[in-house]
Image (cartoon, grey):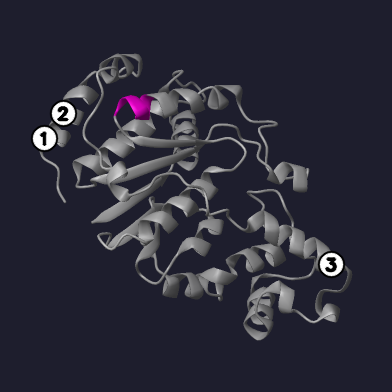
Amino acid sequence: MIVHLVDGTYELFRHYHGLRRAKDGREAPYGAVRGVVRTVLEMLETGATHLGVATDHVIESFRNELWPEYKSSAGMDPALLAQFEPLEEALTAMGVVVWPMVELEADDALASAARIAERDPHVDMVSIWTPDKDLAQSVRGDRVVQVYRRTRKIMSAEAVRGKYGVPPALIPDYLALVGDSADGFPGVRGIGPVTAARLLNRFGPLENFPPEELGPERERALLFKDLATLRSQVALFENVDQLRWRGPTEVFAEWARRLGDPALVERCERAAESPVD
């Protein structure tokens, strides 16, 4: 059995900006929602049986209190922000498990779901569908992997080390040193990817660095590591059977109509009739 964990926030951004480029800035109110629903349905049609989607119900999180410059909803297109809640409602109507995060982030939910699913002996693989660098810390061997949707590249622990120069466990330390522009923290001045990997392979986690190695930047680096460390202890579900998709609910037809794609209902029903384990 493969458990699929989908970054709904990334997918919504991807479809929203893709549609705006394709339509020269003109986009239907639920266009991005329709795109994500279709993407998830395609996964179900091609064999996914156990699946969960994490979203940032509120963009801001506890991390904004730790670092005011952390990513926020400031400056985001209102038309994009307005589609987060409809996405959650549409996927729920389709019968998909959704985790709308408020104080924590979607990435924390994905890390927590991966941890829970990994413990189940019936699970052969956990696939985390997102290109976000911080999710690389959740990769475990070739059992918990990260999947880049656009390239279909699968990131095992070996692939993570090949890409970043450090094992998954040191990804928070790596991001603390090099920064993460997507999340809004700059890293340590003068340290790039090569130097970061060299230092981490020499000393291990930041806490083990000699005091003189980072000097006055040490405390800020530890703060950035805290920002980059995903909270993986959220009790999202008890067992993976709760992630099994069993078909759309009765209200999905109304959502398919609102999304401008009534055929979604028939597609869902066909997919539910012929699940593949």
Q: Which residue is mark 3?
A: 217
**Pointer 2: residues within 10 angstroms few (<14), some, or many (20+)?**
few
Range covered by the magenta-colored residues: 90-94
Q: In this rendering, does residue 151 appear at all?
A: no
Which secondary structure, mark 1?
Answer: helix
Quarter location, residue 34: top left
- Mark pair 2, 1: CA separation: 6 Å
Looking at the image, is 236 positioned above or below residue 120? above
- Outermost residue to the left: 274
Main structural element of the magenta stretch: helix, strand or loop? helix
Residue 73 shown left or right of residue 186 in the figure: left
Return the disc, 3 or 1, that comes first in the chain's sequence.
3
Q: In this rendering, does residue 230 appear at all?
A: yes
Q: Are marks 2 and 1 in contact (CB under 8 Å)?
A: yes
Residue 3 placement (x, y as % from top left): 31, 52
Q: Which residue is mark 2?
A: 269
Q: Are marks 3 and 2 in contact (CB under 8 Å)?
A: no
- Mark pair 3, 1: CA separation: 58 Å
Which secondary structure, mark 2?
Answer: helix
Looking at the image, is 58 positioned above or below residue 128? above
- Residue, x 36% and y 30% (percent of image)? 91
Amino acid type shown at disc 1: Glu
Q: Which residue is mark 1?
A: 273
